[in-house]
Image: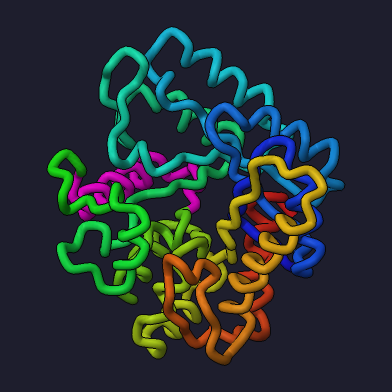
Amino acid sequence: MITDAHVHCLSGALNVLVRALDLAGIDRAVVLAWPGEGEAVAEEAERDGAGRLRVAFAPDLRLAGTARWDAELGRIERLTPSLAGLKIYKDLGFGITNLEGKRISLLSPELEPLWAIADGTGLPVILHCGDPADFWRRRPRLRAQQLMRHPEWQYARQPDVKPRSLMYRERAELVRRHPRVRFVGAHFGGFPDTPEALDDYLRLGPVDTSAALEEVLTFDRRAIGEVIAKHHGRIMWGSDVPVGPPPGRDTAAIKISAKFLADSLSMITQAGTVPAPTPLECPWTVAGLGLTGSARAEILHQTAARIFWRD
């Protein structure tokens, strides 16, 4: 069995995702919905996913602390039996403004009812904290081409963006305050920039590899191997494949998504040189992990099955 613990798909496009999973030889996937899409995607997954898809609901955090927040929390409680978990996107770590103009961040008291729901229901919380360190560097190392395509991610030039280290301190404090909530660190826990940082993030709880594995594999391989050997029961493979807007029966879209999935998967399963699944933004190659045995089984399926399917 192979489970992708981190995919994105718009409502109306889950049939394309399922066919791409088939083409890439992947059995199940966790769909991280966008705010406002969670209920529709969850209903579609129950109807058309044949038990292969589970959906993480992303609350609209602009409602936190407003009169509409209770309704959003009530929606989560109503949908809980059909959800894999909750998804918190990175804008919360950067500090967003609610509809009344108040700043909301990871540690805001307005979010305590949300963490209480996760605690009481057992829903895991997939948390995107921070971004690659290159986005704060004046001279990026690996991701210069990505920043050329997305200049809005050049945070070193934006004085209103928090320091990266502060984001991670707030994340660690959130985990400390809520020890019974299972926080899952998206992107290897927050795009670690050293093996030591990866080890630190894994000590906080489970992570998925999405969009960060291609960078982690450029670190010292002996050190990375030691970290993975120590923590492989907390690591889940996630591709971060985006599917949408709804292309119906578009064969090209299915093939493009399947190739993305296969390229991401090869970084786990192959031992030779493999490309990143987004070569236009991450134009480097790495030596794949070539995992075997229990580490492979846990990273490719068992940990995600335990957390998101309760298997």
Taking the image as shown, residue 142 lies to the left or right of residue 246, namely: left
Q: Is 191 placed left or right of 77 in the picture?
A: left
Look at the image and say whether residue 233 sits in the magenta stretch.
no
- Dividing the picture into quadrants, the one containing residue 41 is top right
Give me the residue at 36% from left, 62% from top: 146
Q: In this view, does 148 lie above or below 277?
A: above
Image coordinates of residue 27 in percent, x first then y, are 78, 62
Q: Nearest the camera: 96 or 156?
A: 156
Q: Give the range drawn in magenta.
A: 162-184
Residue 24, placed above or below residue 19: below
Question: In the picture, which quadrant includes the N terminus?
Answer: bottom right
Q: What is the tally of numbered marks visible in this picture? A: 0
Kindly report the secondary structure that dominates the magenta region of the rendered protein: helix
Find residue 54 and report its horizontal and vertical position in percent: 71, 45
> Who is closer to the viewer here, 149 or 228?
149
Q: Is residue 61 left or right of residue 153?
A: right
The residue at 18%/50% (across/down) is 163
Residue 165 belongs to magenta span: yes
Would you place residue 99 above or below residue 127 in this image? Answer: above
Q: Is residue 102 left or right of residue 128?
A: left
The x and y percentages for residue 216 are: 40, 74
**Residue at x 48%, y 62% (from the top left corner):** 211
Q: Which residue is drawn at 77% across and 35% down?
A: 44
